[in-house]
Image: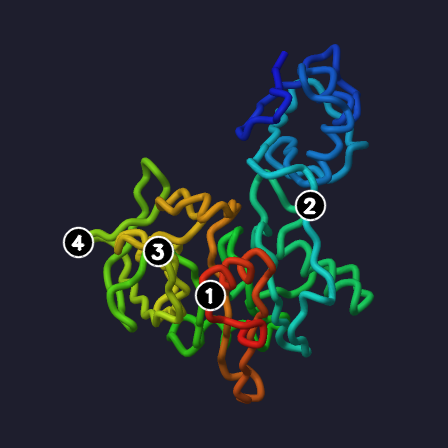
Amino acid sequence: MRTFDNDLQPGVYRFTVTGDLAGLRIDQYLAAASEGLSRSRARRLVNLGGVHLQGRRIRRCSQQVAAGERLEVFVDSRCLESMSLGEEHVLYRDQDLIVLDKPAGMATQPTPARYQGTVYAELAAMLGAATGQKQRSSIGMVQRLDQDTSGVMVFSIHPRAHKKMTAAFKNHAVRKVYWAIVAGCPDRVCGRFSSQLARRRSTNLMVSVERGGKQAETRYRLLRAREGISLVEVELVTGRSHQIRAHFSEAGWPLLGDTAYGGPAEIKGHHVARQMLHARHLGFNHPVTGEPMNFTAALPDDFASLVRLIDGLNDATL
């Protein structure tokens, strides 16, 4: 019998169905085959999309199990409540594109532990509800933001837009501007980082390497600094995974709340629950009409409160 910690520690829990439990619903089976997992919690895991039967994600608790079948339960570090997207998060939509203001804490794409509550799943549901269609929506994921990064992001939602949007990002024809709050103060008002970034397997973090990585270029401008905290505007020339977080950490100015890259979780009595990175602006030409498109996402409350702490920026600037 497998044991689940009361706090549902992250990991993969594997089961093989025995004959005495064959024929049970999945939620019944998980409760009977494990300690510390109630039927209600099992249902929530199924609803999130973290339960896989014979290698396939199961979405119905009523699914029955058979003897010899393999069951995997994937648990991540997040709570079992799923986040949602609403019309208040939509900055723009037409037949070809949708531009969203992504909330912090929301994963962009599904993982083995979670389908429900990801940007992809919520967007698919939103588009389906808007068109009244039950078939799978055509969503081109041309851009990704880290789970704890907030702000503007774009998706192509029609096949005729997919290739051109993908090419625009690949060819650096998209202007991507972020705001970040970092510990310390850059020694210049404007600067740039250029390095090859590669993932270190032991930590799963990105680091600069002499060779064997992918070229990454980051430009920044200091907007405001006060008492060891700085607000910087960052423009990405390339779009590597964790690029901003890695470059500023290596420069000695890690993002507030980015504990994975050495950033402080508390500053001047303020707890910082996530990395202070916000996708502020996105600019590109419409893939079908060619019209210039520019979008700006307002600062979320947790970010804005820290900006005010730095001093000198009023509400109108936010």
Residue at horizontal 61%, vertical 58%?
A: 103
- Which quadrant of the structure image shows residue 253? bottom left
Select label 4 or label 3 by which is in front.
3
Closer to the N terminus: mark 1 or mark 4? 4
Q: Which of 305 and 169 is in front in this view?
A: 305
- Residue 295: which numbered mark, if any? none
Select label 2 or label 3 by which is in front.
3
In percent of width and height, residue 258 lies at 42, 48
Residue at horizontal 36%, vertical 54%?
A: 183
Select label 2 or label 4 by which is in front.
2
Q: How far apart are marks 1 and 3 (CA)?
A: 12 Å
Q: What residue type is labelled 3?
A: Gly
User: Left or right: where does residue 45 sit relative to residue 277?
Assistant: right
Q: Is residue 109 visible?
A: no
The answer to whether 185 is drawn above or below residue 288 in the figure is: above
Residue that badge 4 annotates? 210
Helix, strand or loop at disc 4? loop
The number of callouts visible is 4
Residue that badge 1 annotates? 311
Q: Distance between the residues labelled 2 and 4?
A: 41 Å
Q: Which amino acid does label 2 sit on?
A: Ser
Residue at horizontal 71%, vertical 66%?
A: 88
User: Left or right: where does residue 156 sit relative to residue 39?
Assistant: left
Q: Say if mark 4 contacts mark 3, CB within 8 Å.
A: no
Q: Which of 256 and 2 is in front in this view?
A: 256
Q: Distance between the residues labelled 2 and 1?
A: 35 Å
In percent of width and height, residue 167 lies at 44, 74
Residue that badge 2 annotates? 82
Q: What residue type is labelled 4?
A: Glu
Residue that badge 3 annotates? 228
Helix, strand or loop at disc 2? loop
Closer to the N terminus: mark 2 or mark 4? 2
